């Protein structure tokens, strides 16, 4: 809740005029308690998870060759009801984990300094904070995800997520309720170490969710803008991890590839790619002959 309720009060407090974005933020948040603003992440999670996978659902159901040629595992077909059941499972898991987790984490977010007032962060500040959040989340996620592949943790918890050996966008957060909580820690770690404005906090969780949906989509499009992000894993990288399933000791990182390269957990993926390229080369030469 802001300490001033009019534009004039805010201008006096800041010693300058408000930007258009700050004016809109004042109108929206002036009378809203910080807990309500903090819990927006739950709303955004439901909203973006329900909308972002829709294009991939249509691609899966359409059967068009123009889409199938970019599908990583084209032999696996999902029906509407299979995807709908995945959606229901995830929404139920969100209900019993994410909502309570948002409320429980609120005092921590206030204590570390996630602010809700004016002024709003600049675009440059948002960019660098989001980048730091991705790097921190990726590194911590790598180690926790790797531990989830230990025999006990895999059989009791992580195995649920790997039910989809050919992932789809809807299956990105498909997991045991305990895994949602465990892997929520890396997502909160960045904002905890580098606190910023709550709008940056919202944007971080939205982008992380969209990134997870894209990498679990099962489609690897050559024109995707994520191809230009240095060290980005992408759908093919994530798909290999799911294809190997319980035997996987490769591609543990959530976003980038550098941790897997540094710690040597990329060799199975590299070997598979080399064999695929070799077989393709042999097949092409055979056709030429």
Image (tube, helix red, strand yellow):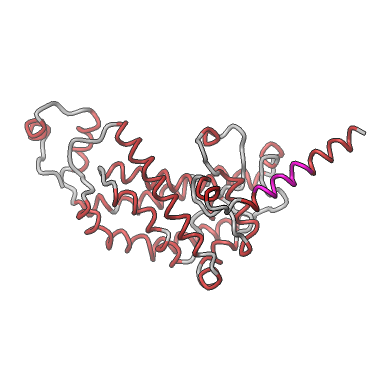
Q: Is residue 126 left or right of residue 69?
A: left
Task: Measuring from the top left, give residue 32's x and y in whole percent.
Answer: 19, 48
In this view, 131 is above or below 111: above
> For the view shown, which residue lies furthest in the right direction?
289
Task: Measuring from the top left, give residue 286's x and y in whole percent.
Answer: 89, 38
Residue at the spot 65% in from the left edge and 56% down from the top edge = 243
Q: Nearer the viewer, residue 80 or 12?
A: 12
In this view, 1 is above or below 7: below
The image quarter containing residue 119 is: top left
Q: Nearer the viewer, residue 170 or 219?
A: 219
Q: Nearer the viewer, residue 102 or 255?
A: 255
User: Dividing the image into 4 quarters, which one contains the C terminus?
Assistant: top right
Q: Within the magenta stretch, is there residue 171?
A: no
Residue at the spot 63% in from the left edge and 54% down from the top edge = 166
Residue at the spot 43% in from the left edge and 67% down from the top edge = 178
Q: Which residues are magenta?
A: 270-278
Secondary structure mainly formed by the magenta segment:
helix
Q: Is residue 232 left or right of residue 66?
A: left
Task: Measuring from the top left, give residue 132's x and y in whole percent.
Answer: 36, 42
In this view, 281 is above or below 72: above
Task: Measuring from the top left, give residue 89's x and y in whole percent.
Answer: 50, 63
Residue at the spot 18% in from the left edge and 42% down from the top edge = 117
The image quarter containing residue 203 is: top left
- What is the number of callouts on the image? 0
């Amino acid at each position: 809740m802001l300490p001033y309720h009019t534009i004039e009060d805010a201008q006096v407090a800041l010693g300058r005029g408000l930007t258009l974005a700050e004016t809109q933020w004042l109108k929206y948040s002036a009378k809203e308690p910080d807990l309500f603003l903090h819990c927006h992440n739950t709303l955004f999670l439901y909203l973006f998870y329900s909308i972002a996978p829709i294009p991939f659902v249509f691609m899966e159901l359409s059967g068009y060759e123009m889409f199938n040629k970019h599908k990583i595992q084209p032999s696996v077909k999902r029906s509407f009801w299979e995807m709908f059941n995945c959606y229901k499972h995830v929404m139920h898991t969100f209900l019993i984990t994410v909502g309570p987790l948002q409320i429980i984490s609120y005092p921590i977010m206030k204590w570390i300094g996630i602010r809700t007032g004016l002024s709003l962060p600049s675009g440059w500040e948002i960019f660098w904070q989001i980048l730091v959040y991705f790097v921190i989340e990726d590194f911590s996620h790598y180690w926790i995800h790797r531990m989830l592949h230990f025999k006990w943790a895999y059989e009791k918890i992580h195995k649920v997520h790997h039910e989809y050996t050919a992932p789809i966008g809807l299956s990105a957060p498909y997991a045991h309720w305990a895994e949602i909580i465990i892997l929520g820690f890396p997502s909160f770690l960045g904002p905890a170490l580098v606190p910023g404005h709550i709008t940056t906090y919202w944007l971080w969780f939205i982008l992380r969710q969209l990134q997870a949906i894209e990498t679990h989509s099962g489609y690897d499009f050559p024109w995707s803008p994520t191809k230009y992000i240095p060290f980005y894993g992408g759908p093919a990288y994530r798909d290999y991890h799911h294809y190997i399933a319980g035997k996987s000791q490769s591609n543990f990182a959530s976003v980038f590839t550098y941790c897997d390269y540094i710690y040597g957990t990329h060799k199975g993926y590299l070997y598979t790619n080399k064999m695929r390229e070799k077989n393709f080369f042999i097949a092409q030469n055979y056709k030429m002959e």
